[in-house]
Structure formats: C-alpha cells, structure tokens
Image: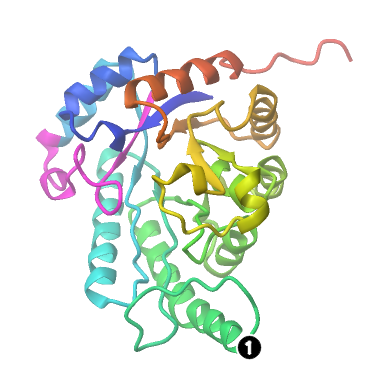
Amino acid sequence: MKLGVFTPLFQQLSFDAMLDKVAACGLEAVEIGTGGYPGDAHCKPDLLLNNREAQHQFKQSLTERGLILSALSCHGNPLHPDQTIAERDQRLLLKTLQLANELGVDRLCLFSGCPGEGPSAKYPNWVTCAWPPEYSEVLKWQWEERAIPYWQQAAASARKYGITKLAFEMHPGFLVYNPETLIKLRDAVGPEIGANFDPSHLWWQGIDPVEAIRFLGSQKAIYHFHAKDVAIDNHNRNIKGVLDTTPYNDLSKRSWTFRTVGYGHGADDWKSIISMLQIQGYDYVMSIEHEDPLASIDEGLGKAVQFLQQIMFKQSPAEIWWA
C-alpha cells in the first residue's frame, strides 16, 4: 500500500513546488483535482487535453520525484437542479474522463451529486427521513429520474475512455452517503461505481468503518481511500445528534470536527482499518486529506504522514510458513 496526499491543500503553490513539497514529506502518490470543489490549481484539463508535450512534462515531473498519480478528482454536483451548474459539472466530468485516459489513470474521485425535490427545484434537497410520505416520493424521483439515468450515461462514457473506476466519496448532502446507497447506485449502473472510502464521513454518521470496509470489500467496491479523521464531541452530539449545521469554524459547538489522522481516533482504530483493507484485497493508495482546523497545513500533514508511516505495512505479506 502506498501513502499519498490529496493536493488542494497546496493550491497556493505551483505544480512543481507542490510536488517538491509532497516528495519531501516522504509520500509516494498524489491525487489531483481537475476542477469543481477541489479546484484545478495543479491540473487544468483545457491546457492538458490533446497536448502531448504538456502531458509528457506533467508525467515527467511526477516520475522525477518518484510519485504516481493515484486519481484525478472532479468533485461537483452533476445532478444539481440549476442546469447551469449541472451542465458545468457534467462537462468537467467528461473532460476529466478524457484526460485520465490520456494520462493513463484508471480512476476518478467524485461525488454522486444531489438533485432538488422535483423538475422545478432551484436547490439540492437531501432527504434524511422516510416520513412524512412526500419525502419518500422525492427520494424515489431523485433516484429514478435523475441519478440512475445520469450515472448510467456517465458510466458508458467512462467505458468509452477506458476508465474502469468511478470512486465516490460517501458524503452526507449527496445521494450516495453510506455503503447502502453506494451499492444501490452500483447495482443500478454497473461495476464502474465504487468507493473513495473516507472513514471520517462514516464515523460522524455513527457507521463503523471497519464493517463498512468488510461490506464493500466483499463486493470489490473500494477503488480509492481518503485518510482523514474526525473527532466526536460527545457533549454536543448527545444534545444535537450528528446532523450538525453549526459552522465549521465554531468548533466548541459542533458535534464533530474533521481532524488530522490520529487526532480523532487512535492507532488501534487505524490499524484495524488498514488490516481490513488488506483482508479485502485493497492494495493501492491511502491519500491523506488534510482538513483539520486546529493544525497548520505543514504540521497537520506531517503529523498524518508520521502517524500512518508507523502503522502501515509497506511489504507484501509473507507466505504462511507456520501451517
């Protein structure tokens, strides 16, 4: 398994300066945004598409530093009820699929998106309960009229470009937010749909990441991994629950807060996650996503790297010689 980083935290640096920083941290992989929520500071599709010279320099810069490109990320909302936004994010996905093909990358990281409550909606509507009955009706419409048809079409485009893995972050606010909804979309669309597994999003919902890995891994549906932690404030959670809309910077009142790996859950929890990933056959990249409001960029990333390097296995397991 390789250790990498999701690079938007270095968006203020040039591409080469970012790669120098990543290599100096002892990392082996980068996950780079092509637009949408992560931005495109280090990978602009319009400048790279059909440009062999620029692509060669892009890949050479990685190779010179001993890095691989684990995935391209185009997180957005292609199901947004505002057609201007939806079409923008759909175009970005198609460009990123083409660019991934030209760069030799086989997977994208992204969100499932979230529609509105019906054809005339202006804003996304994330349904969180089955009653009153209109909520179930909204959810049925969102899946059957928007999500499944769109992702069937997008998966066909992925196949056209030879991209075999569309790795969805299971994130509240979007239709795919837990293992059940991920598999619902996968069953409707095909094996291109899998997880960009981020345990922090599951811990905050009260889901056990180890059991989620067991469940998704048994269906060969884990395509990428985000190493990010979350700290639960039990005082606030016991009063407010986990559906918390308190601003991210009002830390003392939040039920949960994203943290650097190791500052929400300890080594035993992360060892169990790594072990279950191995049991389920995941042997790719753990991509650190640093969004800790209590740590600087450099120190937060450094702490995560140090923590994970101590507990990750770098070599293939030995043959079982004792039995």
Compared across the picture, whether 323 is left or right of 54 comes to: right
Secondary structure of residue under mark 1: helix
Circle 1 sits on which residue? 133
Question: Magenta part of the protein: which range?
Answer: 29-54
Q: Which amino acid does label 1 sit on?
A: Pro
- Answer yes or no: is residue 225 visible: no
Q: Is residue 313 magenta?
A: no
Asked whether, in this view, residue 150 is left or right of residue 244, the answer is left
Residue 166: image location, x then y, percent: 44, 53
Residue 53 is one of the magenta-drawn residues:
yes
Colouring mode (rainbow / by chain / secondary structure / one colour): rainbow
On screen, residue 140 above or below 160: below
Residue positioned 18% across, 24% down in the render: 16
Tell me: residue 51, above or below residue 20: below
> Could you tell me residue 199's position as x and y percent?
58, 42
The quadrant the N terminus occupies is top right
Front-most of residues 223 and 302: 302
Q: Residues within 10 Å of mark 1 (few under 14, many from 20)?
A: few
Residue 165, placed above or below residue 26: below
Q: Which residue is drawn at 22% across and 65% down?
A: 88
258, 287: nearer the viewer:
258
Q: Is 138 located above or below residue 217 in the figure?
A: below
Identify the image quadrant of the C terminus.
top right
Measuring 28% from the left and 16% from the top, which residue is drawn there? 65
